[in-house]
Image: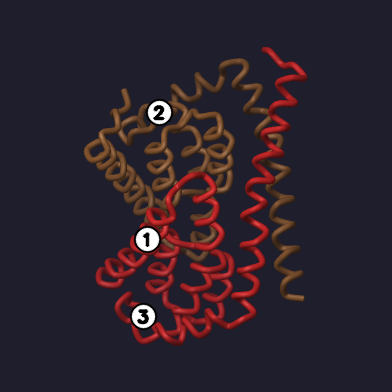
Chain colours: A red, B brown
Amino acid sequence: MEVSWEIVLRGLRKGIATTLELAKVIVPTAIVIRLLQAGGLMQWLAEATAPFMGWLGLPGEAAVVLFSGYFINLYAAIGAMLTLSLEMREMTIIAVMLGFCHSIIAETAISKKAGAAVSLVLPLRVGTSLAAGLVLGGLL
Amino acid sequence: MILLEGLSNGIASVWVLARIVIPLMVVLEIARANRWLERINRWVHPPFRMLGLSEEGAFPVLVAVIFGLLFGSGLIIANYREGRLSCVEVQTMGGFMAICHALFEDTLIFAVLGIPLWLLVVPRTVVAILVSLVIYRVAVKCFLVPAVE
């Protein structure tokens, strides 16, 4: 096995460079997400879209769970889910939808940093998530 | 106040990330110097070949699927600068990784609520494979990108 200071140093340098590169995305998105949470945009969106939740086989109040997952993260979605009394069928639909698409702000920025086109990745995730909801809402 | 909270959340995440990414890059650099990475890549490669991914491209996708988008993307960021990955390959990998990543963490979060495991794993994996197949085929057909050996 070949290990030299040169190799270790190169690894350290790459690790630090990659961390800094990702930090440029993570810190701003963390601030944006915190602002979104405080600003009540999600509450507003959830109220506006509640009437359409039936298409996905979900009650209107489930919109809050979906938007928490989409904009913040899966843990926030579970937190929101546990404050409602949803049936297993509804929780399953939400879980599969959020599997396809979650933490949009942070993860889209990371994907972009890794070279993927936002115009590819974002519609793909939102589209597959909604499609999963429509399919499962009809099937389950 | 809220801005500060966001900032401290962000810095906390970066610190968690640094403690994993920096040692990981050192280990990978040692693995590369000893040609272990080539051996791992050759072993990982076959299922990803039909999606148009090279040996260098399959590894970050696998890391993303197992450990999460952040780590897979970190590897691409480290490698893309070195010119090891083609542009089409980066889009194919991006499509796959965006849909299917952190299969353990994301699945366990919901599995503890009693949601069927297979519903959390199979659809994401199948759709990710289909999506990257389409991206690759379209790129080969429409942009005359050479197919992967």
Q: Which residue is mark 3?
A: A53
Q: Is residue A109 left or right of residue A5?
A: left
- On the rendered image, what quadrant is the C terminus of chain A found in? bottom left
Residue B80 drawn at (x, y percent): 52, 35
Q: Are marks 3 and 1 in contact (CB under 8 Å)?
A: no
Cα–Cα gap, marks 2 and 1: 26 Å
Who comes first in sequence, dot 3 or dot 1?
3
Residue A68 drawn at (x, y percent): 53, 72
On the same chain, marks 3 and 1? The answer is yes
Q: Amino acid at mark 2?
A: Ser
Which chain letter goes with mark 3?
A
Q: Which residue is mark 1?
A: A123
Q: Quadrant of residue B48?
A: top left
Q: Which residue is mark 2?
A: B54
In depth, the one of A12 and A46 nearer the eye is A12
Cα–Cα gap, marks 3 and 1: 19 Å
Q: Is residue B128 left or right of residue A106?
A: left
Q: Up-down: is A94 above or below B53?
A: below
